[in-house]
Image (tube, helix red, strand yellow):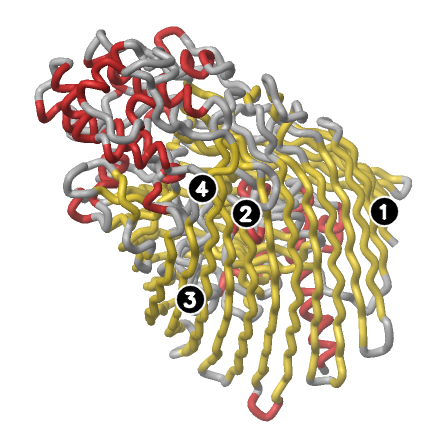
């Protein structure tokens, strides 16, 4: 009967309670499994024992997640070796990586390498899947390409999230939390039958918290003196309908709203441009002696607001129909989702008024998605078979804006005049030199006189009367990308003998994408650049008159023009209409062989091919010209190609000591081609396809259900050697990007620590009088890794250990429990992502340096900022259940 099947599924889900890798919680100790056989996963779209699945899966139960304080996918990383989750300019730019492979940046045209699936519904961007996950049944982290069953954009892995379903047993749960940083939260749920064939569940939560950063606002107008706060509420309603013994329908509707401010960054190295920030009335972290690395700090500088508002809503309908005559089940899963987010940003991360984006709706994006998946799965004595189809239509609308502050023109003047002063001391460093370079119809003679006075002559024949950058709204761009995707797939396991299985999976995906948009300069924005471009010959003559050789003068003149023609100031983008379209079909699939030596040991080997779709850079991308090696002209196409991966694994799954110990170990070797690297070039996020990225290593997992009542241990270790292949400028779609990527060839990739290890202990014990006590500790260790896509040395994060803990006192019947908890218990100080501060120095040079790259540490004048990890948080949570 369908009802019995649902109840069996519910039981098997709950049975993961004391499951692999960090399981705690009072209920788990008494009602959970006592052997490894009870750990059930759905990694192959059917319920199976974890030890029968020939892939690497980390499965985390409800109790494990609760014990480690997991509420979103960023919290999840402490339980998963080889996985990192970071965010940058806003919580929308959240990125998951597995085995050192993932994507970063705020370009919504770039789809995720690690797929996030919530109750069967694929979220095409990690940031869209970020948020309070509500009541969780379990989470499965599948490592390596999962392109057969989970789709095209899962080239590095899948985070498969399964929420609690409605129950026909009435129940009510509520919790209240209070913690440091002014944190508080309330959440509650109710479930039970609405009739003999319909059950419902409703979950609601509200959480607030002050920010982790102290913010120096300078002259403002920013009012908030903290940043990265929390203020959201969420609601999730479900219906489980059982119209007959053979049919079940699950309907889910959810809505979340966030109204917060995030994210500032803080200086980790302040470079020489600090003098210019100060000169225009700004402030940032004071430089260290010799412009060295600064001590860790969560004090940030921002004179503009960082408000962010996000709305996430959706509906899904899953129907399962048993076909007894075929011993099969037909599944239909339909979904609609809409996500939108708008942000304010202080783009220079100082209190100087240079560049910003107000929280007025001019910067953000909206994603609207419809999906339909159908599957037919069945089994005979010798084959478990599955066929299916998947269709989606997705629309992304992105708005981008830039606003000039009053300090932008004098700051650019100081930057440019300092470059000229370095070549000729006759030209002073001045905040008024832009008007010399941008004056229409200028001559070399005029420039010579104007530069000599630093543009400080208010009148006369050398007056700097050229246009600057007017304060206010300078850019408003609009992009719209539409995607239609269709796939058919099959996944079949042949039981060739009682011990030997072969799994064959194949998927064909056809993607059709189109991009339209308009890039628009507002008012007189672009006039300064236009004037400079018209004066390149005069600049060259003036610089030759100052003593520079012709070649050096020409190069310097081009560089001066480029400084005034950054993408947000370039008139060639003004009213530029965009219209592109592209289609591509790709096969992905897998072949696996598994052999069970006995009831305790299974070996397997697999090959999988993954595919990640092509996309478009929704940003202003400039390309080099023949006359000037520096970028001035807009790139003709914003398209970047698809990414593919070939992955090999050899694994051994062991169930030992009377089914009480799990020990799994897997060797993996992955080769990515046309790896989509989203890198910040100082002025825009640009996806550049790196010809080759390899990831090789070992995953090992361990669980021990000890003979001591209520005591369990678990852990995992991942060793990875993830590195880029050797490549040159000629191997890139845009060779002009190579200088900023010149540290990559042959180097270890960012966010790819060599070693990553997790460990957890859970202990629950009755103490009499109807009471019990619980203890959970979860830890993760990572060796050092670089947090920047360009691998600059100042972006390294040292080896670190994160520790979460929880002590629980409660009733044996789970009617109530009081938790004392802490996240990042040792207050580890670490970077999430380090970035080049815009306009504040240069890391890479324009010529090859003695080390063969374009980077020379002795010439690095760049100011570096970082988005920091969360500090220690702690609090108490009271939970009641009826």
Residue under numbered circle 2: 364
Mark 3 or 4, closer to the camera: 4
Disc 3 versus disc 1: nearer the observer:
1
What is the C-alpha distance between the residues marked 4 and 1?
36 Å
Q: Which residue in the protein does label 3 denote?
A: 596
Give percent across and percent down for residue 709: 71, 44
Q: Which circle's residue, 3 or 1, is located before the other in the chain?
A: 3
- Left/right of residue 148 with respect to residue 312 in the rendered view: left
Label 4: which residue? 717
Q: Which residue is drawn at 76% across and 62% down?
A: 237
Give the label, 2 or 4, closer to the camera.
2
Q: Which of marks 2 and 4 is nearer the N terminus?
A: 2
Residue shown at the point (86%, 44%) measured from the top left? 816
Distance from Cα at disc 3 to Cα at disc 1: 45 Å
Q: Is mark 3 on a helix, strand or loop?
A: strand
684 w.r.t. 267: above or below: below
Q: Where is residue 819 in the image (x, y as percent from the top left)?
A: 77, 36
Q: Please state if 130 lies on the left or on the right of 598 as rendered.
A: right
């Amino acid at each position: 009967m369908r009802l019995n099947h649902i109840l069996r599924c519910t039981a098997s889900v709950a049975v993961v309670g004391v499951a692999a890798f960090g399981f705690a919680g009072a209920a788990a100790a008494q009602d959970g499994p006592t052997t490894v056989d009870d750990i059930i996963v759905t990694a192959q779209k059917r319920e199976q024992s974890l030890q029968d699945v020939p892939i690497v899966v980390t499965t985390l139960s409800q109790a494990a997640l609760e014990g480690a304080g997991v509420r979103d996918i960023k919290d999840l990383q402490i339980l998963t070796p080889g996985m990192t989750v970071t965010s940058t300019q806003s919580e929308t730019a959240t990125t998951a990586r597995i085995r050192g492979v993932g994507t970063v940046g705020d370009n919504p045209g770039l789809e995720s390498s690690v797929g996030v699936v919530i109750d069967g519904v694929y979220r095409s961007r990690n940031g869209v899947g970020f948020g309070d996950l509500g009541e969780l049944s379990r989470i499965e982290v599948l490592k390596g390409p999962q392109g057969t069953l989970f789709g095209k954009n899962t080239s590095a892995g899948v985070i498969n999230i399964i929420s609690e379903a409605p129950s026909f047993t009435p129940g009510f749960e509520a919790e209240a939390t209070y913690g440091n940083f002014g944190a508080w939260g309330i959440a509650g749920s109710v479930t039970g039958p609405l009739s003999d064939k319909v059950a419902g569940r409703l979950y609601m939560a509200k959480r607030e918290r002050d920010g982790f950063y102290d913010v120096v606002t300078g002259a403002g107008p920013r009012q908030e003196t903290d940043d990265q706060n929390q203020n959201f509420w969420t609601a999730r309603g479900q219906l489980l309908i059982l119209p007959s013994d053979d049919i079940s329908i699950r309907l889910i509707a959810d809505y979340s709203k966030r109204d917060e401010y995030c994210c500032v960054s803080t200086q980790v190295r302040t470079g020489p441009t600090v003098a210019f920030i100060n000169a225009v009335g700004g402030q940032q972290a004071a430089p260290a002696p010799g412009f060295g690395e600064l001590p860790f700090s969560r004090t940030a500088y921002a004179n503009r607001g960082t408000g962010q508002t996000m709305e996430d809503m959706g509906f899904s309908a899953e129907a399962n129909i048993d076909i007894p005559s075929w011993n099969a089940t037909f599944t239909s899963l339909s979904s609609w989702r809409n996500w939108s987010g708008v942000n304010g940003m202080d783009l220079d991360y100082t209190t100087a008024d240079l560049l910003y984006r107000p929280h007025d709706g001019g910067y953000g994006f909206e994603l609207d998605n419809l999906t339909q998946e159908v599957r037919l799965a069945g089994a005979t004595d010798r084959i478990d078979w599955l066929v299916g189809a998947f269709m989606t239509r997705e629309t992304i609308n992105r708005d981008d804006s830039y606003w000039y502050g009053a300090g932008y023109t004098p700051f650019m003047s100081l930057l440019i005049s300092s470059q000229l002063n370095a070549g000729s001391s006759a030209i002073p460093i001045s905040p008024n030199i832009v008007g010399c370079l941008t004056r229409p119809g200028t001559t070399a003679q005029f420039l010579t006189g104007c530069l000599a006075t630093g543009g400080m002559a208010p009148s006369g024949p050398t007056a700097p009367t050229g246009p600057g950058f007017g304060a206010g709204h300078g850019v408003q761009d609009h992009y719209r990308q539409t995607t239609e995707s269709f796939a058919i797939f099959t996944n079949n396991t042949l039981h060739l003998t009682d011990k030997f299985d072969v799994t064959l999976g194949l998927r064909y995906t056809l993607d059709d994408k189109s991009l339209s948009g308009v890039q628009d300069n507002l008012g007189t924005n672009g006039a300064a650049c236009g004037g400079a471009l018209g004066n390149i010959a005069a600049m060259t003559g003036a610089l030759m008159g100052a003593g520079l050789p012709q070649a050096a003068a020409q190069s310097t003149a081009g560089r001066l023009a480029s400084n005034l023609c950054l993408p947000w100031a370039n008139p060639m983008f003004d009213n530029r209409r965009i219209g592109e379209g592209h289609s591509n079909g790709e096969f992905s699939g897998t072949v696996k062989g598994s052999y069970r030596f006995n009831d305790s040991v299974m070996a397997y080997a697999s090959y999988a091919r993954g595919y990640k779709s092509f996309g478009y850079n929704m940003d202003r991308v400039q390309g080099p010209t023949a006359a000037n090696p520096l970028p001035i002209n807009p790139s003709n196409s914003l398209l970047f190609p698809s990414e593919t991966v070939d992955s090999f694994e050899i694994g051994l799954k062991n169930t030992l000591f009377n089914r009480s110990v799990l020990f799994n170990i897997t060797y993996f070797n992955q080769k990515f081609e046309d790896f989509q690297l989203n890198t910040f070039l100082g002025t825009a996020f640009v996806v550049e396809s790196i010809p080759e990225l390899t990831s090789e290593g070992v995953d090992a997992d361990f669980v021990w259900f000890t003979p001591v009542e209520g005591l369990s241990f678990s852990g995992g270790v991942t060793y990875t050697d993830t590195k880029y292949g050797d490549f040159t400028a000629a191997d890139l779609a845009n060779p002009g990007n190579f200088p900023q990527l010149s540290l990559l060839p042959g180097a270890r990739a960012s966010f790819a620590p060599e070693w990553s290890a997790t460990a957890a202990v859970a202990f629950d014990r009755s103490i009499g009088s109807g009471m019990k006590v619980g203890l959970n500790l979860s830890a993760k260790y990572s060796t050092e890794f670089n947090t920047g896509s360009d691998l600059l040395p100042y972006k390294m994060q040292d080896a670190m250990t994160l520790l979460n803990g929880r002590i629980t006192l409660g009733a044996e019947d789970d009617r109530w429990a009081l938790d004392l908890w802490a996240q990042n218990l040792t207050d580890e100080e670490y970077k999430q992502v380090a970035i080049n501060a815009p306009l504040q120095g240069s890391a890479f040079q324009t010529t090859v340096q003695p080390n063969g790259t374009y980077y020379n540490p002795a010439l690095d004048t760049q100011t570096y900022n970082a988005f920091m990890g969360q500090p220690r948080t702690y609090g108490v949570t009271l939970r009641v259940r009826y």
